[in-house]
Image (tube, grey):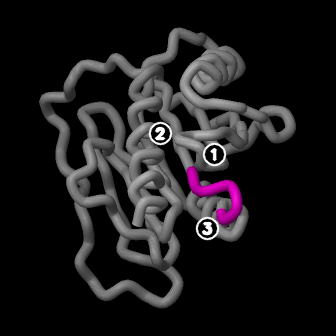
């Protein structure tokens, strides 16, 4: 039970860290996430659309990912101990490379023992250029692993974040790849 509580605190810290780079103003026209209530298939759950005044985010997560009830984020799901979220960020960087460097500074100030896994990787999310970084770190004496994907939607930076205990993170890599291949920003 203590470990589960600590894991929940880690995900709250992850969401708060996401907010470190974000000083966005509240969106007056923000609509709640629309959750389809149809019976999920064996392969995936119902599609979700999160809408802000500027951007619509469409995602159909793989089976087992449950929306986080009461989340302050536009998109946030959990599966076992893993978390997936999408959040608009407020970085000062003018390029994705600048954004990644700025984010690394936040991580290094917020987490212990940050170790990056390889170099940042250029990828595409629904035809939009993006940049992905992966790292491990210590949060409240637990070894965690994260994958962050940054992209510009218009002039706005969005972060797609996957996080889990370091020992179980890789078991969901196929889910992370599916989410990244299916997510759409409009």
Specify the segment rendered in magenta.
163-168
Position of 94 relative to 96 (above/below): above
Res. 150 in view: yes
Q: Please say if the residues under marks 2 and 1 sit with CB atoms less than 8 Å apart.
A: yes
The residue labelled by disc 1 is 146
Q: Residue at x 25, y 54 (%)?
A: 33
Q: CA distance from mark 1 to mark 3?
A: 14 Å
Locate residue 124: give its quadrant.
Answer: top right
Residue occupying the point 71% across, 32% down? 114
Residue furthest to the front = 2
The image shows residue 48 at horizontal and vertical percentages of: 34, 62
Instruction: Report the side of 148 relative to 167 (left or right).
Output: left
Using the rendered image of the protein, determine whether residue 99 is visible from the camera's viewpoint: no
Residue at disc 2, secondary structure = helix
First-in-chain label (2 vs 1)? 2
Tell me if 72 is positioned left or right of 79 in this view. left
């Amino acid at each position: 039970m203590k470990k589960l509580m600590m894991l929940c605190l880690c995900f709250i810290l992850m969401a708060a860290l996401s907010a470190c780079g974000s000083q966005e103003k509240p969106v007056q026209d923000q609509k709640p996430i629309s959750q389809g209530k149809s019976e999920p298939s064996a392969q995936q759950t119902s599609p979700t659309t999160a809408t802000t005044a500027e951007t619509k985010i469409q995602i159909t997560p793989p089976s087992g990912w449950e929306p986080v009830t009461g989340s302050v984020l536009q998109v946030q799901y959990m599966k076992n101990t893993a978390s997936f979220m999408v959040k608009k960020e407020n970085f000062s960087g003018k390029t994705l490379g600048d954004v990644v460097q700025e984010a690394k500074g936040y991580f290094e100030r917020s987490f212990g023992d940050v170790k990056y896994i390889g170099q940042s990787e250029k990828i595409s999310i629904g035809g939009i250029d993006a940049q992905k970084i992966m790292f491990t770190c210590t949060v409240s004496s637990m070894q965690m692993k994260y994958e962050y994907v940054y992209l510009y939607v218009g002039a706005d930076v969005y972060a797609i974040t996957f996080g889990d205990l370091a020992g179980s993170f890789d078991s969901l890599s196929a889910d992370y790849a599916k989410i990244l291949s299916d997510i759409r920003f409009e």
